Amino acid sequence: MPRRSILTDRQRAALFDLPTDEASMLRHYTLADDDLELIHARRRSHNRFGFALQLCALRYPGRLLAPGEVIPLAVTRFLAAQLGIRPDELAGYAAREETRHEHLAALRAIYGYKMFTGRGARDLKAWLEGAAETARSNEDLARRFVEQCRAAQTILPGITVIERLCADALVAAERRVDAVVAGQLDDDMRTRLDALLTEDAGGSVTRFVWLRQFEIGRNSADMNRLLDRLEFLQALALDRGILANVQPHRVARLRRQGERYFAGDLRDISGDRRLAILAVCALEWRGAIADAVVETHDRIVGKTWREAKSRCDARMDDAKLALKDTLQSFKTLGAALLEAHEDRASSKRPSAMPVAGYPSKGLSPRPSN
C-alpha cells in the first residue's frame, strides 16, 4: 500500500523531533532523584547515558530512538550535566543491539510504557475515529493523537503508521458526515438538488453554477440578479436543521468543495457526498446571498444619499451666491438712495440767511414817507 502523507516535513518534525530549546528540555528532560537512582544502577557511563536518553525520549515526544539516530548536541549536553559525565560518552552506547532492547524492556516494566498493540491500540483507534469528526485539520488530528498516546503512556508507532491511521479516520469521518446530511433529505429534495447539476439557467450555465455566481452589487440591476437567486433558493424550502449536528468547519469544507467543483465533476461523485455538498451549498449560499442583498441595498441607499447630498449642497451654494448678489444689489441701491437723498436736501437749503434790519440781497429798499 502506498504511503498516505498528510503532514509536511515541518509538522512531522514538530511532533517527533527531540526538543532542543531550554524551556522544553527543562520541562521534559529534568531527571528526578528516583530516575537518577535507576540510571546510576547501570555499570558503565555510556549505558547510563543511553538509558537516560531512552527514558527522556519515551517521556517526550513519546517514541523510541531509531537505530543510529543522531541526537542533538543540546540534548546530550543537558543530560550529561545532570549525570556528571561527558557528552561524548554516548558514542559507545548500544554497541550491542541487545543492550538497547534490554533497556527498553526495563523502562517499560518500571515506568509502565506500552507498545502500540493489542487492546490499547484498538482503544486509541476508536478514540481517533471520534476525534476525526471534530479535528480542524490533518495536523490537528495527528497532534491530538500523539498527545493521547502520551497520556496513555503508549509508545508512538512510526510516523507512517500515524499518518495512515489519521488519513483513514478523516475519510471515515467525512463519510459519516455525508451520510448524516444526506440521510435527512427526502426523495423529492434529493431529486431537486440533483436537478441543479443538469438544469440549464441560460447561457449554457447549469443552475448550480448560476447560483454560485453572485457578488455584492451596486445598482438595481445587480439587486435584481441577487433577488432572482435568493427567491430560487428559498423556493427549494431546504431546512437548515439538517446541519444541526455537523461541525462548522465540516460545513465550511463542504461549501469550499462545492465552490471549487464544476457540475460535471459533482455528477461523478458518489451519492451521499454529492447530496451533502449540494445541500450545504444551497443553505450557505442562501444566507450569503441574503447578506449580499442587504449590502447591495445599503450601497444603493448610500449612493442615492450621496448624490442627493451633492445636489443639495450644489443648490445651497447656488442659493448662497444668489442671496449674496441680492444683498449686494440692495447695498448698492441703498447707497444710491442715500446719496440721492443727500443731494436733494442740499439743493433745497438757502444760500444765505437775512440779517434783521437789512434787506436781503436783490430786494429794493422800502420807500420812506
Image (tube, rainbow, N blue to C red):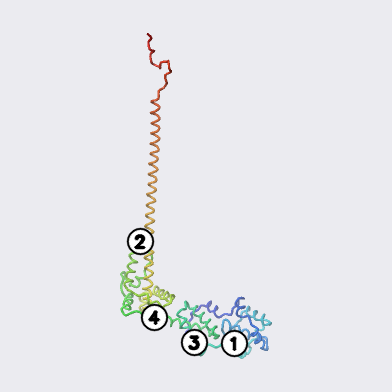
Q: Mark 2 points at which residue?
A: 219
Q: Residue at x 39, y 28 (%)?
A: 345
Callout 1 secondary element: helix
Q: Name the residue under label 4.
A: 180
The label shown at residue 123 is 3
Reply above or below: 317 against 49.
Answer: above
Whether residue 3 is visible here, answered yes or no, is no
Q: Going by the image, does 365 lie left or right of 164?
A: left
Few, some or many residues within 10 Å of mark 3 (<14, 14–19, 20+): few
Q: What residue type is labelled 4?
A: Val
Q: Are marks 2 and 4 in contact (CB under 8 Å)?
A: no
Q: Which of marks 2 and 4 is in front?
A: 4
Q: What residue type is labelled 3?
A: Asp
Q: Quadrant of residue 25?
A: bottom right
Whichever of callouts 2 and 3 sits on the residue coming sooner in the sequence is 3
Which residue appears farthest toward the top when viewing the image?
Answer: 369
Q: Name the residue under label 1.
A: 111
Q: What residue type is labelled 2?
A: Asn
